[in-house]
Image (spheres, rainbow, N blue to C red):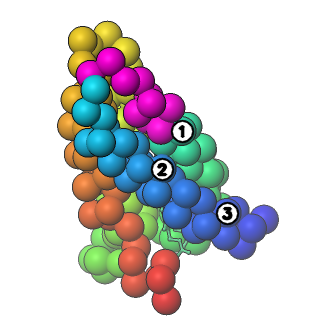
Amino acid sequence: MYPFIKSIHSYFAWAALALIIIAIISTILTKNKESVSYKKWAFFGLMAVHIQLLIGLTLYFLSPFGLDNLSGDSMKDSFTRLLAIEHPFTNIVAIILITIGYSQSKKAEYGSKKILVFYTIGLILLLSRVPWSTWLS
Ligand code: HEM
């Protein structure tokens, strides 16, 4: 079960990050304030990070690098600390910001600005705590 969920989390990360990037680009390309096409991409991005959150939460309880690794010793090592604390916590904050951005965009006069700001901060947070060394190796 663990290798399967880890593999899904690993591959789905591409989709989640790509859709957030496309949503941001789509707001930048929205010249006409009346245009609503960016909303479609913002919605797909939101869905993707929420699905990734559910897969990540499941993985946290299955992985030897998740909950099982919460100990004083693992906090001394930067890689084990990244997987047990920094990656989950930062990504949850990023997903909350993306969700706030999406919901605020519905109320704002120019919703694309809210998407641009919140999704960009969320993306920076997500990218800052991806375990690049294991993911791309
Ligand atoms: C959009 C949000 C997220 C993205 C893009 C993401 C991406 C990734 C990536 C690329 C890896 C490395 C996979 C590999 O080495 O093959 C990973 C590992 C991991 N992620 Fe996430 N993640 C996200 C959210 C979360 C959340 C919210 C949690 C937990 C609450 C979580 C828990 C984990 C754990 C425990 C691992 C280590 C798995 C292992 O090596 O055993 N992730 N994540």
> Is the magenta region chiefly helix, strand or loop?
helix
Label 1 CA crowd tier, 10 Å (few <14, some 14–19, many 20+): some
What is the x, y in percent for residue 10?
58, 68
- In the rendered image of this protein, does residue 103 appear above or below residue 54? above
Q: Amino acid at mark 3?
A: Ile
**Image point 41% across, 24% down: which residue?**
36
Relative to 83, is 62 on the left or the right?
A: right
Q: Amino acid at mark 1?
A: Phe
The magenta segment: 33-43
Question: Splitting the image into 4 quarters, where does residue 116 fall?
Answer: top left
- In the rendered image of this protein, does residue 29 appear above or below residue 102? below
Q: Nearer the viewer, mark 1 or mark 3?
A: 1
Q: Nearer the viewer, residue 108 or 78?
A: 108
The first of marks 1 and 3 along the sequence is 3
Relative to 62, is 43 on the left or the right?
A: left
Q: Is residue 39 found inside the magenta-colored segment of the image?
A: yes
Query: According to the image, label 1 marks what residue?
Result: 44
The first of marks 2 and 3 along the sequence is 3
**Image point 32% across, 62% down: which residue?**
127
Q: Nearer the viewer, residue 14 or 64?
A: 14
Real-space CA distance between mark 1 and mark 3, rounded to the nearest whole angstrom: 18 Å
Query: According to the image, label 3 marks what residue?
Result: 8
Disc 2 to disc 1: CB gap under 8 Å: yes
- In the rendered image of this protein, does residue 63 appear above or below residue 34? below
Numbered disc 2: secondary structure: helix
Relative to 89, is 57 on the left or the right?
A: right
Q: Amino acid at mark 2?
A: Leu
Query: According to the image, label 2 marks what residue?
Result: 19
Q: Is residue 91 visible?
A: no
Q: Is residue 1 visible?
A: yes
